[in-house]
Amino acid sequence: MIPGRRPRSDAGAPVTADPPADGVKGDGMNAPLDRLAERFAALLPPGGVITDPVRLATYECDGLTTHRASPGVVVLPESAEHVAAIVRACVEENVPYVARGSGTGLSGGALPRTDGVLIVTARMRRILEIDLPNQRAVVEPGVINLDVTRAVRANGYYFAPDPSSQQICSVGGNVAENSGGAHCLKYGFTAHHVLSCEVVTPDGDVVELGSGPGYDLLGVFVGAEGTLGITTKITVKLTRVPETVQTLLAAFPSIETGGTAVSKIIGMGVVPAAIEMMDALAIEAAEAAVNCGYPADAGAVLVVELDGPEAEVAHQFAAVERLCREAGAFEVRVAADDAERALIWKGRKSAFAAVGRISPAYLVQDGVIPRTALPEVLASIDALSAASGVRVANVFHAGDGNLHPLVLFDDAVEGAADRAEDVSGKILDLCVEHGGSITGEHGVGVDKARYMPRMFTDTDLDTMQMVRCGFDPAGLCNPGKIFPTPRLCGEVPGVRKGPHPLVAQGKAELF
Ligand SMILES: Cc1cc2nc3c(=O)[nH]c(=O)nc-3n(C[C@H](O)[C@H](O)[C@H](O)COP(=O)(O)OP(=O)(O)OC[C@H]3O[C@@H](n4cnc5c(N)ncnc54)[C@H](O)[C@@H]3O)c2cc1C
């Protein structure tokens, strides 16, 4: 079993606890953790250490709520020095640790360990420096994504990565997941907006990763899902607010016609700031949740946003409107002002949560396909849904082929969760078969570790784990994430001969 993962005996209800780690006493007390909790209490200001089981429950999962584990100890450091001291103490006690920002991750990256320490950055929320002439800001990892924009908006700047969770997710979490968002088609992912990171390495050293000669270690660190160290200070790029923004909502009879419009728009050479699509089921959910006023009879809606210099946007916007109509849009609404723009976005931005209105439970999937394969893959998802009886609502960043199928199920019905997971897995297979990826922006975490071999060869995975071992020889930094079968440092890469030692000990499972 991947440590920290709890298999479910029934739909959505996690039941099995992790196997106790070495040093766990029969009465549930854990000597290394007890010693650590005492050390942390001496290190941190009041309230910085949580051991009360009721309060620990707050941290037992992230946005992937099907996987839960109560952390051994939670700590709330306030500085890089605190984080470094905590990591060094964990290394001395050979105790694993996991970083957590706001806990909105959707792949279980911040899933804690019952035998480990959860390092939460919620008390590291200072914006340390704003340097407008050089278009950069220095922030602590717990700073909320949207707060960076709020701090500089009046000066005509913003922080471009815009995950839909931007009101609550942290910049540290964005860095770890290399998060995207609706506007990443034009502006790029978090990686394109991070200039340097101060990092507490798995040895407890504090180092600076930035651009410069030599290997691009910053590039390795961003998107590593918290497995290569903990970032304690991030220098981000600030982007100029564009001169103008124009947004439209186009309603199509079908996903296919909407997909044709996407191809035509991109084919024309326009790079929209965002181009998002929702299918009929997703529209129904959004309508029920936020009354966004999308045309009720649409088989699909497209939200297209252009930004930039006024003259350029005006010219391109007229062409986009025309292409939508030519592709079959039966209604095109152009936002006349900020309020109308906000209403158009309200439906799309609330789509994940809105699905709760039409289904008791659902899985948020995240896969990527080449844009041109959209119609074919969506037809296959439809067929999968019809054959299995599992409803799938589709929301996607159409411009870069990043799908977010929402797989609906009723967790009160026996076997429904397993059927939903099965459909989910088959959707990822479709993505890989079409030359895409098992994740676009939500990461691998625990959720998709088992799918990694569908995309990568043993040699690929070994090479990645050698990189991980280079940073974290002790294997204590967010273990059990990303890789289906963790390698130990010092193991010879290549085809494994005999079972992995952790498998032999019953601590890891081969999927
Ligand atoms: C409603 C909703 C909508 C979402 N929309 C999007 C979207 O549009 N695009 C998108 O990309 N994602 C989206 N997400 C996923 C999620 O919000 C992002 O992955 C986000 O970046 C996670 O930030 P967090 O602070 O919540 O991180 P957490 O969930 O706390 O942690 C995520 C990972 O980061 C690691 N980590 C956290 N802090 C640090 C640190 N300081 N140093 C090193 N590692 C660290 C953790 O160990 C974990 O592996 C959405 C989630 C929700 C719930």
Image (cartoon, rainbow, N blue to C red):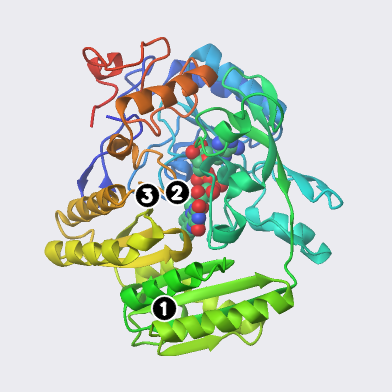
Tell me if label 1 and label 2 are in contact, CB under 8 Å. no
Query: What residue is drawn where x is 59% and y is 31%?
Result: 230
Query: What residue is drawn where x is 68% and y is 27%?
Result: 82
363 relative position to 473: left or right: left
The extreme front residue here reads 268
Front disc: 1 or 2: 1
Residue tagged by mark 3? 65
Camera-nearest residue between 318 and 391 = 318
221 relative position to 391: left or right: right
Residue 455: which numbered mark, if any? none
- Image quadrant in which you'd find residue 465: top left
- Image quadrant in which you'd find residue 504: top left
Residue 301: which numbered mark, if any? 1
Label located before the other in sequence (1 or 3): 3
Label located before the other in sequence (1 or 2): 1
> Is label 3 in a helix, a strand or a loop?
loop
Residue 442: which numbered mark, if any? 2
Q: Amino acid at mark 3?
A: Thr
Front disc: 2 or 3: 2
Q: Amino acid at mark 1?
A: Val
* x and y, in percent, of residue 254 in the image: 31, 79
In this view of the protein, can residue 247 be seen by the observer?
yes
